[in-house]
């Protein structure tokens, strides 16, 4: 039994209603009738109805007593004695229960201790490698290519790295030690040659004891690669997908990847020959993902010792394929996180998109709303599926996006 807790425990996510609402994403995309999903506020009943209409079975859904956003989901669960007792009883009855988290921070370690249920991670490894300087040091030690950059401890270190680049007209990005969320969450900042370096640096939230500064690559082509290391030490690649980035941050994915086979094979070789063997020695366990620039030069960038957003989309798509697209060969998807600029309910989105959400309307094409939690905050996560091509999936996504944004009358 999997107990799915999509906790947004990174310090940069604390107190943010939008970030905490991402807890309404992963459980439905991944979880089925044998799983347990815990959330800090209830799902929209209309969204659950829609989810079931796609053919998904629902997991057991538990809601914590409090929705106090000053605390993370894991902390709220600990304070909910009745829920904790129920989880303990379910785990004891099942005999093979495990906790699966999104962010893996100290609250998740404390929750695992409190419940006495094993977690599908190695907390020491995950906490260490969730810090950006740690992964950069690892790559440098093992000959894995990284972006030109520097691990800095203070503004003086940053100036030594940045000023020569500014003289060449280069821009830099500065990432806090625990920079999950990137620029939108304040965990990273762009600095141009004409900017005041000191003033810009002070805009960085929680830089930490060490932070990373890197040259910004012009016109990068990126992929994200996801893998898993099981309890028994079996490592497997879950998938590789092209990544869509806006403002130097994750915005979406496209599958399958359009990168050349030799490029993807080289990335896989680096993973299987350098990262995974060393991670196994450190007793890493669970889900992992990394963003890799594959052009114009290969650079391993942001590593996450946890699930990535693409995993949820991939799992959901795999399930949908069995339900609606099993008689097709390859399927293609285009997924993006879209800013709508206004608060929406799921019913409003459903009315706007209409038949595009119906798998029977246009066999071989489908739009899926993959996260109801962000709708009240002016965002929507859309996945377009096509059996024809990447371009067709993109075109179908754009059709849905334009309808929501009101540009397609």
Image: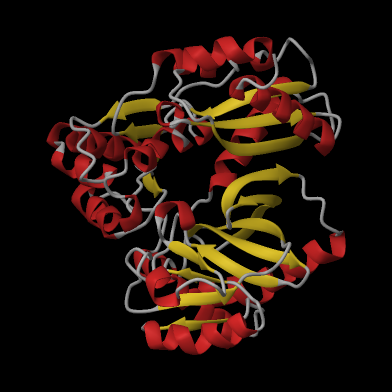
Residue 270 location, x and y as percent? 70, 73
Whether residue 346 sits left or right of residue 97 in the image: it is right
Name the residue: 56% across, 9% down. Answer: 351
Residue 362 location, x and y as percent? 78, 14
Asked whether the viewer can see residue 57, the reply is: yes
Image quadrant for the N terminus?
top left
Image quadrant for the C terminus?
top right
Whether residue 150 sits left or right of residue 5 in the image: it is right
Residue 29 location, x and y as percent? 53, 33
Give the colour scheme shown. Answer: secondary structure
Q: Nearer the viewer, residue 291 or 18?
A: 18
Q: Nearer the viewer, residue 129 or 192?
A: 192
Q: Nearer the viewer, residue 114 or 391?
A: 391
Asked whether the viewer can see residue 4, the reply is: no
Name the residue: 46% across, 85% down. Answer: 159
Q: Quadrant of residue 89?
A: top left
Q: Is residue 186 above or below residue 275?
A: above
Name the residue: 73% across, 72% down. Answer: 298
Whether residue 366 sits left or right of residue 89 in the image: it is right
Q: Quadrant of residue 370?
A: top right
Whether residue 38 sits left or right of residue 309 in the image: it is left
Q: Is residue 53 above or below residue 243?
A: above
Residue 7 location, x and y as percent? 35, 45
Q: Is residue 199 above or below residue 73?
A: below
Name the residue: 84% across, 32% down. Answer: 329
């Amino acid at each position: 039994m999997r107990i799915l807790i999509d906790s947004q425990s990174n310090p940069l996510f604390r107190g943010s209603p939008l970030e905490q609402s991402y807890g309404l994403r992963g459980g439905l995309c991944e979880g089925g009738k044998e799983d347990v999903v815990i959330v800090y506020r209830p799902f929209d009943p209309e969204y659950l109805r829609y989810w079931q209409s796609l053919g998904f079975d629902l997991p057991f859904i538990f809601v914590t007593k409090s929705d106090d956003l000053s605390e993370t989901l894991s902390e709220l669960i600990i304070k909910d004695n009745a829920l904790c007792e129920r989880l303990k009883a379910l785990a004891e009855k099942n005999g093979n229960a495990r906790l699966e988290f999104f962010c893996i921070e100290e609250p998740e370690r404390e929750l695992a201790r409190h419940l006495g249920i094993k977690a599908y991670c190695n907390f020491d490894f995950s906490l260490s490698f969730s810090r950006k300087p740690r992964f950069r040091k690892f790559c440098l030690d093992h000959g894995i290519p990284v972006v030109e950059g520097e691990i800095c401890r203070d503004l003086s270190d940053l100036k030594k790295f940045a000023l020569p680049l500014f003289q060449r007209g280069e821009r830099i990005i500065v990432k806090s030690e625990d920079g999950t969320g990137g620029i939108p969450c304040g965990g990273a900042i762009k600095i141009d040659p004409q900017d005041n370096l000191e003033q810009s640096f002070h805009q960085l939230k929680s830089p930490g004891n060490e932070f990373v500064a890197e040259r910004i690559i012009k016109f990068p082509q990126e992929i994200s690669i996801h893998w898993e290391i099981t309890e028994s030490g079996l490592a497997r690649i879950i998938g590789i997908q092209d990544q869509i980035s806006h403002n130097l941050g994750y915005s979406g994915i496209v599958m399958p990847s359009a990168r050349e086979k030799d490029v993807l094979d080289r990335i896989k070789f680096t993973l299987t020959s350098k990262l995974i063997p060393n991670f196994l020695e450190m007793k890493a366990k669970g889900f992992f993902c990394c963003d890799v620039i594959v052009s114009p030069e290969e650079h391993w960038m942001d590593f996450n010792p946890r699930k990535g957003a693409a995993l949820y989309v991939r799992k959901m798509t795999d399930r949908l394929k069995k339900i609606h697209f099993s008689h097709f060969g390859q399927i293609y998807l285009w997924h993006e996180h879209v800013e709508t600029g206004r608060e929406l309910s799921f019913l409003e989105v459903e009315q706007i998109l209409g038949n595009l959400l119906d798998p029977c309307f246009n066999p071989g094409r489908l739009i899926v709303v993959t996260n109801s939690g962000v709708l009240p905050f002016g965002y929507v996560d859309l996945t377009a599926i096509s059996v024809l091509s990447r371009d067709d999936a993109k075109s179908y996504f754009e059709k849905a996006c334009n309808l929501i944004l009101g540009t397609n009358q």
